[in-house]
């Protein structure tokens, strides 16, 4: 009976010891895991981005120096209508679209521009150009996404006056929002046959601005 009791005590004590050791090990392992979690705690911050898109409008001519298709006065003394043209390509990201204006580089104060040369100048005006008579002006032909502005929305040999260097540029056309908008600028000129021989020139400036 004493042996049985002693053996039971040993078994009980051994079980208690094993339980205590197991509990200690589990507690230790749990502490290690908890320590590892504390070591890998996360930290965060933010980055704020701001990008800018600028408003733009542009116009470009396909042929910067278009030649007149024929002389205004021939070597036989015959007056002719000369025609020169170029394609305009333009665009804008402005919601209201764009406006293109036109003006020349010559002209006396507050007067239209002129084809200026060695003799008397050929003054721009609104008219139907006719060979052998002074005439010089511009017309507009609508392309993609554009609308020609009066009085430049004419055809045939009809032209509208081009403002001079000291005058306010005239509205030539309007265009819708986007790129690849097109139109055609056509210039027609004629001269009296008695004009002094030589070259008569002008430089036209086309300016694109966003429409407000």
Image (cartoon, rainbow, N blue to C red):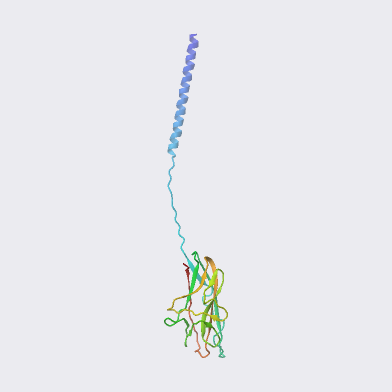
Question: Which percent across, then down, holds residue 202?
Answer: 48, 80
Q: Considering only vertical position in the picture, is 31 above or below 73?
A: above
Residue at left offset 43%, top offset 38%: 39
Q: Residue furthest front?
A: 150
Count of numbered badges drawn on the protein = 0
Q: Considering only vertical position in the picture, is 94 above or below 77?
A: above
Q: Quadrant of residue 42?
A: top left
Question: Which percent across, then down, holds residue 106?
Answer: 45, 81
Residue at left offset 49%, top offset 72%: 100
Residue 185 or residue 11, whichever sits in front: 185
Question: Which percent across, then down, holds residue 156?
Answer: 58, 80
Residue 39 or residue 154, whichever sits in front: 154
Residue 140 or residue 86, whichever sits in front: 140
Q: Considering only vertical position in the picture, is 98 above or below 68?
A: above
Residue at left offset 49%, top offset 14%: 8
């Amino acid at each position: 009976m004493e042996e049985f009791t002693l053996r039971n005590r040993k078994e009980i004590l051994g079980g208690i010891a094993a339980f205590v050791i197991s509990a200690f090990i589990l507690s230790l392992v749990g502490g290690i895991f908890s320590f590892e979690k504390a070591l890998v705690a996360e930290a965060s911050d933010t980055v704020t981005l701001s990008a800018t898109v600028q408003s733009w409008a542009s116009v470009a001519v396909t042929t910067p120096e278009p030649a007149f298709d024929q002389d205004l006065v021939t070597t036989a003394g015959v007056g002719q209508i000369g025609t020169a043209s170029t394609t305009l390509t333009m665009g804008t990201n402005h919601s209201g679209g764009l406006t293109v204006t036109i003006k020349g580089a010559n002209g006396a104060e507050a007067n239209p521009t002129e084809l200026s040369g060695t003799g008397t100048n050929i003054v721009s005006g609104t008219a139907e150009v006719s060979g052998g008579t002074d005439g010089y002006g511009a017309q507009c032909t609508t392309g993609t996404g554009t609308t020609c502005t009066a009085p430049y929305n004419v055809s045939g040999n009809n032209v509208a006056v081009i403002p001079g260097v000291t005058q306010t540029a005239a509205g030539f056309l309007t265009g819708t929002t986007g790129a690849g908008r097109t139109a055609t600028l056509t210039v027609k000129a004629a001269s009296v046959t008695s004009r002094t021989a030589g070259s008569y020139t002008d430089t036209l400036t086309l300016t694109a601005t966003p429409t407000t």
